[in-house]
Amino acid sequence: MIIMIKNPIDVNYIFNERDIKLLKELGWYGSIFIQNHEEYDKKKLEEVKEYGKIYDLNIYSAIKIQSKSSKELLKYVKKYRDKIDIIMVEGGILKINRQALELHNVDILSTPELNRQDNGLDHILARLGSTHRVAIELNFKELLKKKHYERAKILWAFRRNILLAKKYDTPIVISSGATDRYDIKSPNDLRSFLNTLTEDANYSKHIMETTYKIVEYRTHLKKNNVIRYGLEIID
């Protein structure tokens, strides 16, 4: 029996009309369009949103912050938090992994295992992600572009981070990381991949739906009557 995924949302760099149409055709409910923090272009984002309206694909915005400095990371989080929907932090450096997982204003720690010999997380960091609602990303493209030992190492890191996330109730998301139409995957493709890692179809479904929950949470916080989560002004 196929378990239906509610409102699957991909995380990628897709911005042109033809590929936005393909995302919709493959069954995505929405797409989070990533821009690197040094290349933020509001006009480009608005164009992507217009294509989304044409093809009935919900478009959300994301900034990926790449920094080796904790102080600089804080500066960019503050700069972009109110401008866009999702704040991502590129991981790999242990102090950056930790800093990102300690910040309520960060949504996703991307590739915590990047350029490391380990998975970039331990039980302490997993607990921080759970406490502060910061999700761990499994980036499918990062896996695909590697070969042999490097690919096996990332697969091991994915499995290890899934085990930690499940144990400590840390949010976890999967992204295609697509930069063009040849990288785009369907929701069922990514769910099938997750099934091989988790060996638990229900948990794979939970991961597939977490991205929408993050977007829903941030969208809710942007409402004028919301002071903070759980505290609203009622007329």
Image: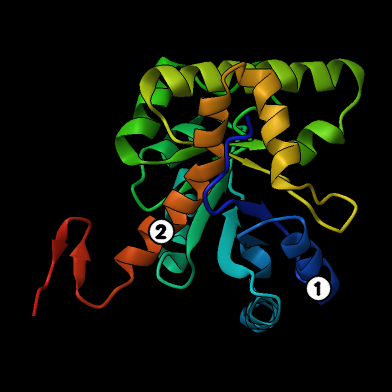
Query: Which one is in front, 106 or 56?
Result: 56
Q: Quadrant of residue 49?
A: bottom right
Relative height, residue 192 to residue 87 (above, below): above
Q: What amino acid type should be assigned to the residue bearing mark 2? A: Glu
Q: Identify the residue at the far front of this view.
A: 1
Work out whether 186 lies above or below 54.
above
Instruction: Please tell me which residue is depicted at 42% across the width and 64% down the height of the picture.
Output: 81
Is residue 117 in view?
A: no
Q: Which mark is residue 152?
A: none
Nearer-the-camera pick, 25 or 129 = 25
In front: mark 1 or mark 2? 2
Q: Residue 2 appears at what percent x and percent y?
A: 63, 34
Quarter of the figure with residue 29: bottom right
Mark 1 is on which residue type? Answer: Asn
Q: How many marks?
A: 2
- Residue count near mark 2 (Cα–Cα under 10 Å), binned few <14, some 14–19, many ≥20: few
Q: Position of residue 8 (x, y in %)?
A: 59, 51
Quarter of the image for the N terminus: give it.
Answer: top right
Residue drawn at (62%, 50%) of the image: 66
Q: Report the quarter where the C terminus lies.
A: bottom left
Q: Which mark is residue 16?
A: 1
Q: Work out which residue is located at the far left of the displayed protein and give it.
A: 235
Mark positioned earlier in the residue sequence (1 or 2): 1
Task: Indicate which disc residue 216 carries.
Answer: 2
| Visual colour scheme | rainbow
